[in-house]
Image (cartoon, helix red, strand yellow):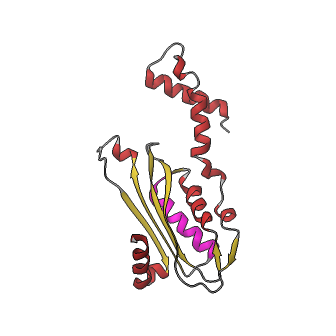
Amino acid sequence: MTTREDAMDAVEKLVRYVESIDGELREGLIDTPERVINSYEEIYSGYSLEPSEILDSTFNGEDYDGIVLLKNIEFHSTCEHHLQPFSGKAHIAYIPVDRIVGISKLARLLDCHSKRLQNQERITKSIADDIMEYLNPLGCAVIVEAKHGCMRCRGVSKQNASMTTSSMKGAFFDNAEARNELFQLINN
């Protein structure tokens, strides 16, 4: 297994490569490897989270049968292809059967998946799959909108391009009325 020291050595090698340094690191770069590894522990904290533990605490839904929607949840992630950041917002909805979950759990589930090396499609699908598996609702919908660093600062350099992904399950996939109500709620 790679140790923290191994990781800091790797960052120092990258800094030396970028800066073309053969000798001593200049003052501003001396502590950069440690700072980078410290930031990685936060940025990639999703690897220490488990969806089953996040969604394990539910409440009696008291016969509520409407849409539960948490919208405009900010997130930051890292593209697994170029190690560039991407960020945006997510909308997570479900229609409960018997049990509901605290709304902070939906935001934590987003963090669980986004704070990893990722692609946007996987984040979207994973959240929907987890909600269906652990809450067993009538339906679930996840819509993620993001701007990607790999599109903005390299390659095609398109500053305002954003990508939207969605995963509709159960009632949101099968029922146009449920889908339309969801879109109205998101757009209000």
Out of 183 and 36, give the one closest to the viewer: 183
Highlighted magenta segment, given as a residue range: 118-135
Residue 75, image x, y percentages: 50, 54
Q: Is residue 119 magenta?
A: yes
* Foreground pick, 185 / 100: 185
| Residue farthest bottom in this picture | 63
Mainly helix, strand or loop, the magenta region? helix
Relative to 17, say whether 127 is above or below: below
Question: Looking at the image, which is closer to me, 67 or 152?
Answer: 67
Residue 29 picture location, percent across and down: 53, 22
* x and y percentages locating residue 137 in the rendered image: 58, 79
Q: In the displayed structure, does residue 94 sit left or right of residue 157?
A: right
Residue at the farthest front position: 188
Give how far across and how far down residue 116 sits, in percent.
55, 50
Determine the residue positioned at 60% across, 84% down: 64
Q: Is residue 130 above or below residue 78?
A: below
Residue at (59, 32) in percent of width and height: 35
Q: Is residue 57 magenta?
A: no
Residue at x-position 65% and y-position 36%:
2
Question: At x 53% / y 54%, what residue is drawn?
Answer: 114
Task: Give the left or right position of residue 49, taking residue 66 as reference.
Answer: right
